[in-house]
Image: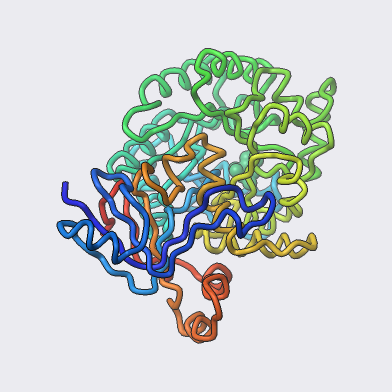
């Protein structure tokens, strides 16, 4: 495989910019270069120095384009691609009215394959190189997603969504079939190529205690898998969880009681957390995933980014499509910024970019491998054009530093801002 040298402005991180001074964690070079060899990043440094040292490398010069690690979406639902932006409902009604009827279609393997491929192509076009997706209750929906990701050589996380109550008949499994199907799927896919399996109880209201216990047992038998679910998204949902699990201390306890709280657990939303839940998530080292476009679209609430970061929690960023209203991690960063502002915190562009790359990769326990513009990482790379539209371009022309140049693209950018995407050192065409 020939070496590739990408030239442009390079942005990476050496630490977490949500903790301490963000400036201490930034690795930025306005005349940088990224050398790719064998699908991995072999060096990051001054562009001309790398060019002189590696005259055999094929050069792609992006000028003042920004070379970043590819975006990592830490929570989404690929089966909801076909009903994104459905009007007028909050969480429980939204699930029943729009989500479940669409998810019922994924028993058809051909339909699942079509939507899986479409979703991955849409997200790649938006600069996202890793997706973490819920599937549906149908094993074929999981096969379709992992197969489509393998065809694109993308690192992904996914799992069969398990539900054995409070869902339509055609979308219910059982405690036993959820265990058996999830086990067969994880044995088939986990660690194959770039596929990672996540055991996936949808959320406490749609699983009986028996199903929760079966999935907790499966996780204890396969502790190297991730576990993904939802936590404390909306007040009516939280009240419902308390009715369904009267003995639980809080929402998190409904998972903990059944072996579904662990370091490799990913808890989507986590907006209305109680003190004990925050302390317990921190103690365990579990991760929460912020889904800001979803939280405003479904009307869920304002995630406490700085409070939870200061408490020590690991935090990822995600679209949560189709509850989220965009496939773009740029739009997602913008929404995270807006929610921060509504809580009195202005997240810095460095913090937003870190969340969309390194932060999300850490929640998936894939740090150093993806979301990382540094030697040794897989060369999953996104190049941003910081002057992609007339509106952004006129603002970019007035920028006084890289952050002032990048922020308009974060706030106003979309797939037009994505100049190029590389997956494991191969340019996506
Ligand atoms: N809670 C349970 N299922 C879902 C889902 O599909 N989307 C969102 N946003 N929240 C959920
Ligand atoms: Zn979700």
x, y (%) of residue 128? 43, 53
Occupied quadrant, residue 272: top right
x, y (%) of residue 377? 38, 43
Could you say which is closer to the camera, residue 67 or residue 132? 67
The C terminus, quarter of image: bottom left
**Which residue is located at x 73 percent, y 55 percent?**
299
Occupied quadrant, residue 340: bottom right
x, y (%) of residue 65? 39, 70
Label total for image: 0
Q: Is residue 62 above or below residue 205?
A: below
Residue 424 in view of the camera: yes
Residue 95 in view of the camera: no
**Which residue is located at x 43 percent, y 69 percent?**
30
Q: Is residue 316 above or below residue 7?
A: above
User: In the drawing, does residue 256 fall left or right of residue 265?
Assistant: right
Could you say which is closer to the camera, residue 336 or residue 355? 355
Could you say which is closer to the camera, residue 164 or residue 202? 202
Q: Is residue 370 above or below residue 428?
A: above
User: In the drawing, does residue 187 fall left or right of residue 278?
Assistant: left
x, y (%) of residue 381? 37, 54
Colour scheme in use: rainbow
Ligand 2 quadrant assignment: top right
Q: Is residue 4 above or below residue 199?
A: below
Occupied quadrant, residue 386: bottom left
**Which residue is located at x 54 percent, y 57 percent?**
26
**Which residue is located at x 64 percent, y 23 percent?**
260
């Amino acid at each position: 495989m020939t070496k590739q040298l990408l030239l442009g402005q390079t942005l990476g991180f050496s630490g977490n910019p949500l903790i301490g001074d963000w400036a201490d964690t930034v690795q930025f070079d306005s005349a940088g270069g990224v050398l790719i060899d064998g699908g991995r990043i072999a060096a990051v440094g001054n562009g001309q120095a790398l060019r002189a040292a590696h005259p055999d490398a094929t050069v792609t010069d992006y000028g003042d384009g920004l070379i970043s690690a590819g975006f990592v979406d830490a929570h989404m639902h690929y089966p909801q691609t076909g009903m994104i932006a459905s009007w007028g409902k909050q969480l429980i009604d939204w699930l029943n009215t729009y989500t479940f009827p669409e998810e019922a279609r994924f028993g058809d393997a051909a339909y699942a394959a079509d939507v899986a491929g479409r979703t991955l192509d849409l997200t790649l076009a938006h600069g996202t190189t890793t997706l973490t997706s819920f599937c549906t209750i149908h094993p074929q929906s999981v096969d379709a997603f992992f197969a489509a990701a393998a065809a694109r050589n993308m690192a992904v996380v996914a799992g069969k969504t398990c539900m054995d109550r409070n869902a339509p008949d055609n979308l219910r499994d059982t405690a036993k079939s959820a265990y058996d199907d999830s086990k067969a799927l994880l044995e088939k896919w986990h660690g194959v190529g770039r596929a990672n399996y996540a055991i996936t109880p949808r959320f406490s209201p749609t699983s009986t205690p028996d199903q929760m216990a079966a999935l907790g047992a499966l996780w204890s038998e396969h502790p190297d898998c991730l576990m993904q679910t939802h936590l404390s998204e909306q007040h009516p949902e939280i009240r419902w969880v308390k009715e369904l699990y009267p003995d639980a201390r809080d929402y998190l306890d409904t998972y903990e009681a059944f072996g579904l709280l662990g370091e490799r657990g990913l808890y989507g939303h986590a907006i209305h957390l109680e003190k004990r839940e925050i302390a317990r998530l921190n103690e365990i080292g579990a991760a929460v995933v912020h889904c800001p476009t979803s939280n405003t679209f479904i009307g869920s609430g304002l995630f406490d980014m700085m409070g939870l970061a200061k408490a020590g929690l690991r935090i990822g960023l995600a679209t949560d499509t189709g509850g989220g209203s965009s496939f773009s991690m740029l739009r997602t960063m913008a929404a995270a910024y807006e929610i921060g502002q509504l809580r009195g915190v202005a997240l810095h562009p460095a913090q937003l970019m870190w969340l969309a790359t390194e932060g999300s990769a850490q929640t998936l326990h894939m740090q150093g491998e993806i979301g990382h513009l540094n030697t040794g990482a897989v060369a999953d790379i996104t190049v941003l054009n910081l002057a992609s539209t007339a509106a952004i371009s006129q603002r970019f022309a007035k920028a006084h530093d890289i952050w002032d140049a990048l922020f308009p693209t974060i706030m106003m950018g979309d797939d037009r801002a994505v100049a190029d995407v590389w997956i494991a050192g191969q340019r996506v065409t």
